[in-house]
Image (cartoon, helix red, strand yellow):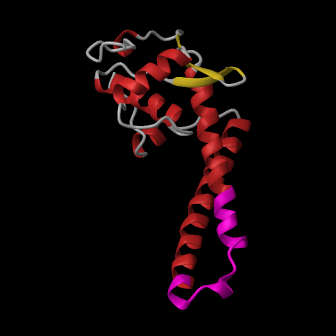
């Protein structure tokens, strides 16, 4: 039995470009979540926990889950060169998922099965998510138009958004 006072993964010393084996992931889980059973969301929980711990010591890392072979995964700690492509792809996937589910709000619910209050709540959600989707589409279209014209996107967008970059 491992000593519970010794941490199985030195998360403070993780370096960009390295990886975390499945065995280390499982040991980390047992150490940080001793009263919880491993389940289908445990990998995400471990990944978020490690990233949050690193952010707390002002040494953020980006972790990508990689399938090694059937039934085995590892976490790759991305380099600063690899991270932008990965994070941009993840952000785009999130936008696409939002669009898909916003569309389903409009198409997959039979309003005849809802009472008046439920219909109002559905309509509010439909309007809210349609607005978000429209704003995303408009911003994406405008961004592509500027880039096609050879113009760069304004950096002021970052400052005006709630996506604050770390202080340099």
Q: Nearer the viewer, residue 34 or 50?
A: 34
* Quadrant of the rendering where the N terminus is positioned: top left
Measured along the vertical axis of the image, is residue 43 above or below residue 133? Answer: above
Left or right: 106, with 31 as reference point: right
Residue 135 in sight: yes
Q: Which residue, as the protein is rendered here, is positioned at the far front? A: 1
Left or right: 54, with 68 as reference point: left
Residue 150 coordinates in the image, percent (x, y): 69, 32
Please name the residue shown 42% across and 27% down the image.
29
Q: Nearer the viewer, residue 165 or 3?
A: 3
Whether residue 101 is in magenta: the answer is: yes
* Magenta residue span: 100-118
* Quadrant of the rendering where the C terminus is positioned: top left
Residue 77 in sight: no
Please name the residue shown 49% across and 21% down the image.
25
Measured along the vertical axis of the image, is residue 21 above or below residue 26? Answer: above
Residue 82 coordinates in the image, percent (x, y): 59, 18
User: How many numbered marks have been drawn onto this rendered protein structure?
Assistant: 0
Residue 66 coordinates in the image, percent (x, y): 64, 22
Whether residue 28 is in magenta: the answer is: no
Q: Which residue, as the protein is rendered here, is positioned at the far left? A: 5
Residue 123 coordinates in the image, percent (x, y): 57, 78
Please name the residue shown 47% across and 29% down the image.
47
Instruction: State which quadrant residue 46 falls in.
Output: top left
Please name the residue shown 56% across and 77% down the image.
122
Q: Nearer the viewer, residue 25 or 162?
A: 25
Q: Main secondary structure of the magenta part?
A: helix
């Amino acid at each position: 039995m491992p000593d519970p006072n010794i941490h199985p993964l030195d998360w403070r010393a993780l370096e960009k470009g390295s990886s975390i084996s499945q065995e280390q992931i499982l040991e980390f889980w047992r150490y940080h979540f001793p009263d919880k059973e491993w389940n289908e969301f445990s990998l995400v929980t471990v990944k978020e926990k490690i990233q949050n711990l690193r952010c707390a010591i002002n040494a953020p890392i980006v972790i990508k889950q990689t399938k090694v072979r059937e039934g085995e995964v590892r976490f790759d700690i991305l380099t600063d060169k690899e991270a932008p492509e990965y994070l941009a792809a993840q952000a785009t996937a999130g936008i696409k998922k939002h669009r898909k589910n916003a569309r389903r709000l409009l198409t997959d619910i039979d309003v005849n099965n809802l009472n008046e209050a439920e219909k109002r709540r559905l309509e509010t959600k439909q309007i809210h998510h349609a607005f978000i989707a429209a704003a995303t589409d408009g911003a994406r279209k405008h961004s592509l138009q500027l880039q096609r014209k050879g113009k760069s996107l304004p950096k002021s967008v970052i400052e005006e958004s709630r996506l604050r970059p770390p202080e340099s």
